[in-house]
Amino acid sequence: MKHLWWCFPCGRIPSGWVSTSFSLAFFRVLLACVLVPSGVQSGVGSRPGPWGPTPTERQLRWHEMEFYGFLHFTVNTFTDKEWGYGDEDPAVFHPTNFDADQIVQVARDAGMRGLILTAKHHDGFCLWPSAYTDHSVRRSAWRDGKGDVVREMHEACRRYGLKFGIYLSPWDRNHPEYGRAAYVTYYRNQLRELLTSYGELFAVWFDGANGGDGYYGGARETRRIDNRTYYDWPATWQLVRSLQPMACIFSDAGPDFRWIGNERGFAGDPCWATLDLTKPGRYPGGSSEGLTHGERPGTAWVPAECDVSIRPGWFYHSAEDGRVKTPEQLLEIYYASVGRGCCLNLNVPPDRRGQIHEQDIRSLRAFRRRLDLTFATNLAVRASLHTSGTRSPVAQYSPSHLLDDRRDTFWCAPDQVLTPSVELAFAEPIRFNVVDLREYLPLGQRVEAVVLEHWSRGVWVEFARATSIGNRRLIRLSQAVEAERVRLRVVQASASPALTEFGLYLEPGL
């Protein structure tokens, strides 16, 4: 009430003012005008509500990883194949100098935050001594038949601070019962072994390669399955949920993160983190409709992973040593995957020694060096910030949160303001060619389009625009922009924008 003393010299509100509904409404409007700062409307002191589907805690942890690796390693490495037929002698698996520490160190130095190992590929050979088959490292001469690639990789990841995940191929071209009910029991038994024997997993990866010709325990024939029903995916996923509740499950349609629809590493633009799971074909090996761009608003939060190999193939082949992706190619993939709100899963296959090849290492190091130099300094922190409006309380939703390098704080516009702007003013001109934006994901994906401008000769000049933001949006310009004032304008949103990061960076050499 003390804020109204200036209105009433007696220091009291006349009793007649609150005796009717009209007077009470007038009083509320007057009180709001006094207490709410300019540009702040509605929801005083309240947290903004979420819009659309939102991520779970395990999905938020997955989003934070952004970049991790795939390790395709099995008998194919030694037979020079991409897909083994299932009739390979386990003795062929014999890395001459397997070094899990070397593999993990290379991944860590490249900036990866985790590794997913192909514990079993389509050929059915198991990289751990499974109790349910002899078609595994147990029958290999490697480590005198006492080796366990899965364990060594898990322990190395733990030593070097990387998270660990597994891929267990649903298809098995070796098992005699594949295509029958008994195989599904076998598959889940192996999945249970992996889920209970190797510590906490950040991801369990399933794909849609199912059915076809194979060895099948000596029966050289073609076996077909109905991939909609054969695996009873809901029950298989529930096994993961019960034993590894924080592990994110991958397949063409999630349920935690989805395939991007290609193996080039490029997300669509826009790329929404949501998908309509009510559509037919939402299962491993099902329809690819909507995967590249996502679907808005969607029925569930199912963000995309971009999986791609550093080489033409997924397994190591010496003939491809001269065809490793260049640092610039890796950068293009990074900006088109991580930079479009996805996670990048980059396959780096161990060679026949059981190590990452030197050519792959050289490319990864140069790629990492370029990223580190680019993102070493956020030029935006030098600026003073001005917005067209901030939600109340201003301290909680201040635009300063855009520059504090924290994901748990954010700037938010008032409820009714769907097209706010943020201006950065610098004491002296800066040069940049990369813009970095993030949304506050617990509130959903709210922004649909933004425009970026710089002040030039008395007018605002557009230099970039983008659609979806989500976990991260990186806008990479071919030429550097020099400016003393930069403005971000949201031009389309479904709910009041909530942004947690605004960065400006300059790539070396520009």
Image: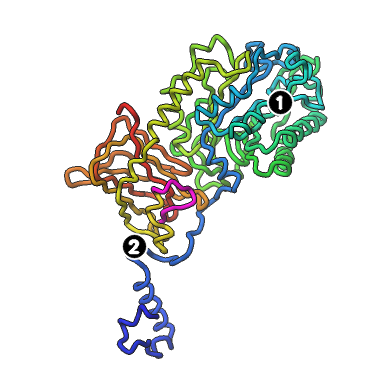
Near mark 1 (Cα within 10 A), the count class, few <14, some 14-19 or many ≥20, is: many
Name the image quarter holding residue 336.
Answer: top left
Instruction: Name the mark on residue 379.
Output: none
Instruction: Name the mark on residue 171.
Output: 1
Chosen colour scheme:
rainbow
Q: Main secondary structure of the magenta part?
A: loop
Magenta highlight on residue 406: yes
In the rendering, at what x and y percent does residue 426 appear?
A: 26, 46
Q: Which residue is disc 2 drawn over?
A: 39
Residue extent of the magenta highlight: 403-412
Residue at position x 48%, y 48% in the image: 407
Q: Image quadrant for the C terminus? A: top left
Does 72 sit left or right of 134 as displayed? left
Q: Nearer the viewer, residue 223 or 199?
A: 199
In the rendering, at what x and y percent does residue 191 appear?
A: 74, 33
Magenta highlight on residue 26: no
SS state under label 2: loop
Mark 1 vs mark 2: in front: 2
The residues bearing labels 1 and 2 have C-alpha atoms spaced at a distance of 58 Å
N-terminal of the pair, mark 1 or mark 2, is 2
Q: Amino acid at mark 2?
A: Gly
Name the image quarter holding residue 70.
Answer: top right
Q: Amino acid at mark 1?
A: Trp
Residue 234 visible in the displayed image = no
